[in-house]
Image (spheres, grey):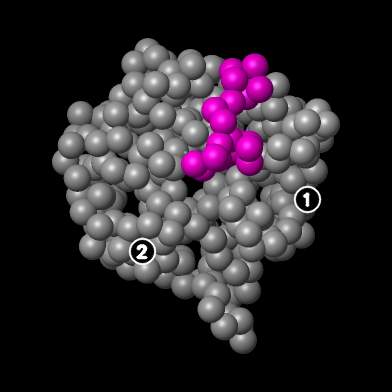
Amino acid sequence: MMPFYFGTNFKMYQTPDVSRRFVTDLIEKGSDIGAAVQRFVIPPFTSLQGLPALAHEGGVWVGAQNMHHADEGAYTGEISPKMLAALGLDMVMLGHAERRQHFGETDEALNKKVHAAHRHGLKVLLCVGEDAREKHFGVERETVARQLKTDLHEAPAEIDLMIAYEPVWSIGAGGTPATVADVLYTVRGIHYTLADIFGQERAAQIPVLYGGSVNADNCGEYARLKEIHGLFVGRAAREVDGYLGVLRAALKARGT
Ligand code: PGA
């Protein structure tokens, strides 16, 4: 049985001290959360050193928000998969909407990063989602299919992979929460595409998480969907109490 995945992306918030405090509190205050839930946090690079050892005491995974595809090289300001793997990280998030939007991250570049993460034994949390214009024209499924097929081009079936579906129009302060119908339509498309890429059997083992303006009030309706295997939360989980509040509400709705 797949666990219920629940994580937060710290984005460009949280200094190293605050990140450590977050993880310590998360473990302490969430000590009743059982093995049926896999929690994770994705802090900024500067918070990662030493964090996995602390987080693993409470079974919490730690990931990075991005990486370069090369092991090393003349790429000033970049962080390599080799460096992340040396920190004992569990995962790397790739293709977050804010990276695609503000840093021009392309699917071709993501494809190289996906292969690099796999080579270094890092689990990939691949983010996909359509923007407002693509939604307007009804090409949500086509958009996520294009992203998945390009980002995962020639990825081996055994790649350690999770998908986060995050519609761009629903992320962040100006975002609108998606309806259940919106989520189901595109998430079903994601499942079809994963089956296309990896075959039905393998695709069924790949967790698909939902993210975008998820909070304690609306998480239940997403968490109840059997097509969703977890939630990925930004603002509402920025404080530990918020994180645990959303998680507990989701678990209650799911009946876990
Ligand atoms: P949000 O962010 O929950 O604040 O909308 C989600 C995300 O960017 O992953």
Residue found 47% across the figure and 38% down from its top? 232
Q: Which residue is mark 1?
A: 150
Residue 91 against residue 86 in the figure, above or below:
above
Residue found 75% across the figure and 32% down from its top? 135
Number of numbered discs? 2
Please provide the residue range marked out in magenta: 163-183
Residue 168 colored in magenta in the image = yes
x and y percentages locating residue 76 in the rendered image: 57, 83
Q: Which residue is mark 2?
A: 48
Q: Is residue 146 visible?
A: yes
x and y percentages locating residue 231 in the rendered image: 47, 32
For the residue pair 216 and 22, the one nearer the viewer reads as 216
Relative placement, left or right, of 26 versus 79 is: left
Report which quarter residue 29 is drawn in.
Answer: top left
- Mark 1 falls on what kind of element? helix
x and y percentages locating residue 255 in the rendered image: 37, 13
At label 1, which amino acid type do we have? Thr
Residue found 70% across the figure and 27% down from its top? 186
Relative placement, left or right, of 138 versus 91 is: right
Residue 60 colored in magenta in the image = no
Q: Residues within 10 Å of mark 1 (few under 14, many from 20)?
A: some
Report which quarter residue 165 is drawn in.
Answer: top right
Q: As drawn, which residue projects farthest toward the bottom?
A: 74
Residue 144 against residue 78 in the figure, above or below:
above
Residue found 70% across the figure and 40% down from its top? 131
Q: Residues within 10 Å of mark 2 (few under 14, many from 20)?
A: many
